[in-house]
Amino acid sequence: MKQALLLSLLITGVSFNTIAAEKIHWQQWGKTPFTQAQAEDKLILLDVGMEGCTACRWMDEITYTDARVIQLINENFVAIAADAEAQPDVGERYSDWAWPATIFMAPDTTQVLALAGNRRPGNFVPILEELIKKKANNQLQADQLAPYAAPPEPEKTELTRIRNRVRAQLDGLLNEQYGGWARSGISTASGARVEHLYLRAHMYSNAELLSLALKTTDGYLKAIDPVWGGVFVKTFHDNDNRPARFRALGAVPEKRISNQANALVAFANGYRTTREPAYLKGIEEVDRFLQNWMMDDDGTFYTSQEDDPPGLTDNMNAIDYWLLDSDKKRRKYSIPPIDHAVYTDKNAQVIIAYAQAYEATEKQRYLDTAIRTTRSLIKSRMQNENWILQTVASKTTKNDKRMRPLITNKKPFLSAQAWFGSALLSLYSTSGDVEWLKRAIRLADTMKMKLYDNENGGFYTSAIDETATIIPPRKPLELNAKAARFFYDLWIYTKDERFALIPEQSLRAVAVKEILTREGKITGQTALALEKLTAAYVEFSVVGENTDPATLALFEAGKLTYHPRKLLHYEKAGRYPVRKKSAMYICNPDRCSIPITDPTLVAKQADSFRLPASFSP
């Protein structure tokens, strides 16, 4: 093969070194490369990935530096590279093929093929050649698995039926022996699904669901790195059929902050449910990693740590490295690179997780961490129009060896707004500080104005721009569910009718049968939103001066009460009668508790707001 290529190059008068020295002519996502492809009648190759992804790095360093690959792409394709985290609208659109996702389109942007994971040159070149041949012979066909666009009209089915469909999808994939949603192990990316188990277990007092939630959380414990702390992206089951070296580590050794946030939430739920010291230790181990390795000087958090340190020799691979049992031994081979980019949506997940860790442990430093991160993001990213940037240029990223340039698009992404809005409300519920509620209201108003579809409901992934005439705008299922939860909580806190209809309208805009089926188990946020809207809130309202020790004691009791549907806040005068003593009222749409003046009675009264076990699926 190499001899044939060399002969071909000599015949055409082009040297092998000339082509090898060339690079792929990558362009940024936008209207320009798509119009170029149409004008030049070229295929489109879209590479979507993230910096902390080992498979992405292999593709970048091995496949996309291969001479034949470079030649075929530059001559026949318009090549586009997108960072899934810096550009979360693009990342979400192609997340079914993560990571890397390699998407091929016809010149008119019709998707014709999508590949999940890396390909080496030997099997990537035939794919490129086959696509080139099919185009020349007019044989390209539309990929039936191409990303869905915004549905033409909202779903009309009752929400309880949609909820039951999502429950059935998730429950059908549960591993009842080990927990989690896979046969080969437990992914620490399954955070919302774990939350959903804990919520349902509590809501219906269901011991079986609680057992499954705890089994999954135990899988998270097995993913902890005993040397540096933090969790890896996945653990394997004890009987997994893998080489002994892999089984010894028992994990995929990448670390991402979204996985750390998921672990904190799972451990917080596990600890509050059982008071098991192992879950408390889990919280501490994740915090140790985040504080020591991933925190910037301003209190925000970096994105990920790769699995391969640059100093490995031929006799040691990444698995051997992570099996080393001391800091000193690992540092001998250098430190795996850290992606120092700071993304708002990922940091918001960490803020929410730290707020839950604080409620579970009563350790003030966890809440202090969440507040510091939030204030730093507001200071550097909040725009005058009250929306927040996904990322900004940073001194710490200048020395990173990145696969793709760090894109700092100055436009509102749904991912950043929905997650940060939820983070603000988590601080409001945990601290009682009305500043966070006011900021959440302003952010929500801007989300409505810039991202919401007033005709059919639902939120677009980003503000409609010039690419919308080429690539249909998308309303993503899981991000709309996250936005629905944010607006639902905001409506309950404020009683402001301008927020009242958005949660259900947002879910109906995307929760059509075809999309739910397509997303499969990646429906954790959707499940949580549907549970919240169908079972309704449980509101803990504290009435009294928030400087009064009695009022503070009631708020503290509410904070320490475990209730996954809880919305805790100080209530303004007028909704409830002002009494001589401070009081708490626990209410849902159907009933309210008696006025609670004794903090020791809060947990008992809250427990009466579970649903009858007979309602449990």
Image: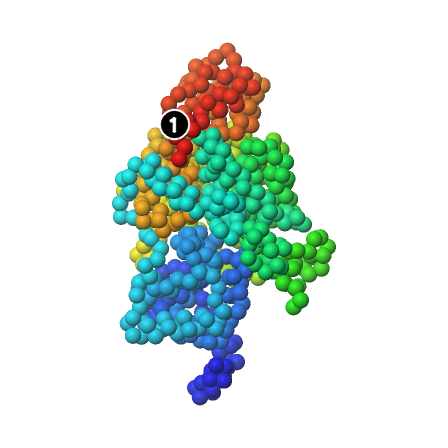
Classify 272 as above or below 585.
Answer: below
Q: Position of residue 67 (x, y in %)?
A: 49, 76
* Residue 446 visible (yes or no): no
View extreme (right): residue: 328
Q: Quadrant of the C terminus?
A: top left
Nearer-the-camera pick, 468 or 199? 199
Dot 1 crowding, Cα within 10 Å, few <14, some 14–19, many 20+? few
Residue at 45% x, 27% y is 610
Classify 140 as above or below 502.
Answer: below
Residue at 27% x, 48% y is 152
Q: Position of residue 539 (x, y in %)?
A: 44, 26
Q: Position of residue 488 (x, y in %)?
A: 39, 34
View extreme (top): residue: 580
**Left or right: where does residue 114 sit relative to residue 363?**
left
Q: Position of residue 72 (x, y in %)?
A: 42, 74
* Residue 3 visible (yes or no): yes
- Kind of residue at badge 1: Lys
Residue topped by disc 1? 495
Residue at 39% x, 45% y is 169
